[in-house]
Image (tube, grey):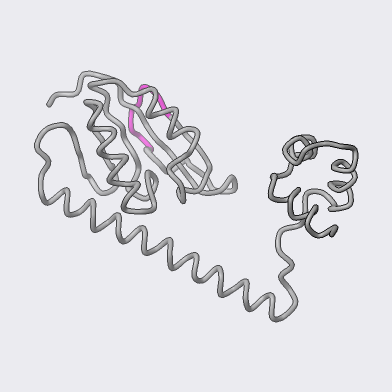
Amino acid sequence: MIMKGQKIGYIRVSTVEQNTDRQLLDVELDKVFEEKVSAKTADRPQLNAMLGHIREGDEVLVHDISRLARNIEDLHRLVREIIGRGCAVHFVKENLHFSGDKSDPTQELLLSMLGAVYQFERAIMQERQREGIAVARAAGRYKGRPKKIDNHEIRRILAEGNSISKTANLLGVSMSSVQRAKREAW
């Protein structure tokens, strides 16, 4: 299959502190979708925008497999979705290319193996994080993320007759934060 569409870049890092400059460096692209968000979910704004933008004949270029997905189910689903729209996916670092043509069984195997490695890597990272938090808590050094708003303020807004969702919207907090503050009052 000869691609005649656009070359679309998808660039992702997990946090705003991280830099995207090394991804797809020196790759000529027609359009780039870039975001700084975790890949723990496939529901990401720029990923969704990219999926909405691609058209038959386009080629989606991603620096490496872990930039598209951090779990094997999302990875396979996204690759299938992209090629199902008549587009190709190219993972630059791994030099893996998938399109509507019959895929190379070796590339399919590598996609699964490398996807599993990235999923394992994320699980190990989370385990280390949980262990570090447990040690810091035991030493009295970990207090969790600071609250955005005081529970008394949440209860005051609720007492004015506002619903849980309206209170959450007014204060810029989640509904679960409002519900937790309400429960703690009783």
- Camera-side residue: 16 or 78? 78
Q: Which residue is located at x 33 percent, y 32 percent?
A: 27
Rendered image quadrant of residue 136: bottom right
- Camera-side residue: 77 or 183? 183
The picture places residue 20, in percent across and down from the top left corner, at 48, 42
Left or right of 90 in this view: 127? right
Q: Is residue 53 above or below residue 172?
A: above
- Camera-side residue: 94 or 177? 177
Q: Residue furthest bottom?
A: 139
Magenta residues, dominant SS class: loop
| Placement of the N terminus among the 4 image quadrants | top left
| Placement of the C terminus among the 4 image quadrants | bottom right
Region rendered in magenta: 25-32
The picture places residue 160, in percent across and down from the top left corner, at 90, 38
Rendered image quadrant of residue 183: bottom right
Left or right of 72 in this view: 129? right
The picture places residue 61, in percent across and down from the top left corner, at 31, 35
How many numbered marks are there? 0
The picture places residue 168, in percent across and down from the top left corner, at 75, 40
Q: Which residue is located at x 34 percent, y 27 percent?
A: 8
Left or right of 57 in this view: 64? right
Q: Which residue is located at x 23 percent, y 54 percent?
A: 112
- Residue 21 part of the magenta-drawn span: no
